[in-house]
Image (spheres, grey):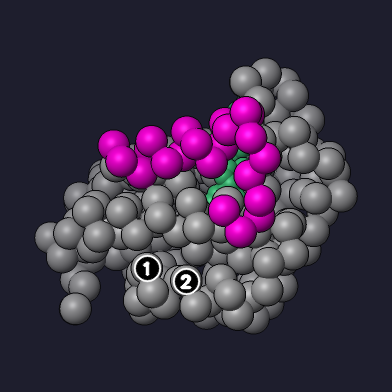
Amino acid sequence: MTTVGTFISFEGIEGVGKSTQMREAAKHLSAAGQRVLATREPGGTPLAERIRQVVLHEKDEGLPASAELCLMFAARAVHVNNLIRPALQRGECVLCDRYLDATFAYQGGGRGVPDADIQALAQLTCGDLLPQLTILLDAPVEIALQRMAERGTATDRFEQETVAFFERVRRKYLSLAKAHPQRIVCVDASQGLAAVAMAVRQALQSRGLL
Ligand code: Z5A
């Protein structure tokens, strides 16, 4: 299926500022005349948001890594088919707070699921759909966790993970950026808000999107 819109994902460990920077980018892209759809994973449609509730907040039973992986892809299959592909077909600019790289980073780097298993499920659920541009916001784990602590939101299953877990996730993200330099732009998210926003803006400009 030919897609005519633009697909951009925002990635990084929790608290690096993905949501904040995605909102800024949406403003700039809208002002530049793009029709912007901002969405997130897991979630983005009513059904995928219900799956999100389970995968982030299940407390009564243990959730094995394999089940967590399948739930992430179940939500993604719904999201891609029901929201992302149709929006791209309409020529919209889809901004997604996390996508497939998050699965390689969290379920792969964090939980130890082999890349080949993740790749097989990716092929099954989203085919060849990859973002044209991925902004990886990178900061030391302690900075990101400090920001989350200051924000003081309710905790989910991931937010209760150890520093070592987030270090593995960060390392995997950085290795993905090294492996896919054409698609993934790594931004130093330890800087202040304005400096990070400027770097994101430059990445969009370098792709002719602004
Ligand atoms: N997950 C997974 O395991 N596998 C998958 O395939 C997918 C997801 C798709 C839900 O993610 C969880 O799902 C996620 C991984 C897993 N869990 N973790 N960890 P989420 O995206 O919904 O939740 P999150 O990653 O925890 O995002 P967040 O809480 O919204 O954080 P953020 O978007 O990166 O940060 P923010 O909300 O923009 O900023 C956090 C605070 O820092 C806020 O108060 C800001 O004002 C402040 N901030 C932001 N930038 C700055 C700078 N530059 N300086 C100072 N302060 C700043």
Badge 2 element: helix
Quarter, ligand 1: top right
Verify whether residue 210 appears in magenta: no
Question: In the image, 1: left or right of 109?
Answer: left
**Quarter the C terminus occupies:** bottom left
Magenta range is: 46-67
Q: Does mark 2 have its CB less than 8 Å from ligand 1?
A: no
Q: Secondary structure at mark 1?
A: helix
Q: State how far apart marks 1 and 2 are (Cα).
A: 6 Å
Return the x and y of residue 113 as percentages of the image width and height.
Answer: 68, 67
Q: Which mark is residue 55?
A: none
Where, by quadrant of the figure, is residue 138 drawn?
bottom right
Quadrant assignment, res 60: top right
Query: Pointer 1 and pointer 2: residues touching (CB < 8 Å)?
Result: yes
Q: Amino acid at mark 1?
A: Thr
Q: Classify 79 as above or below 120.
A: above
Q: Which residue is mark 2?
A: 121
Location of residue 209 in the rendering, given as x and y in whole percent from the top left corner: 33, 63
Principal SS element in the magenta part? helix
Q: Is residue 102 visible?
A: no
Can you say whether 199 is above or below 23 in the image? below
Where is residue 150 shown, x and y percent of the image?
Answer: 72, 21
Residue drawn at (46%, 39%), measured in percent from left and top? 52
Is residue 68 left or right of 140 when viewed as pictured?
left
Please tell me which residue lies in front, 112 or 4.
Answer: 112
Residue that numbered label 1 is attached to: 125
Q: Quadrant of residue 180?
A: bottom right
Nearest to the observer: residue 52 or residue 130: 52
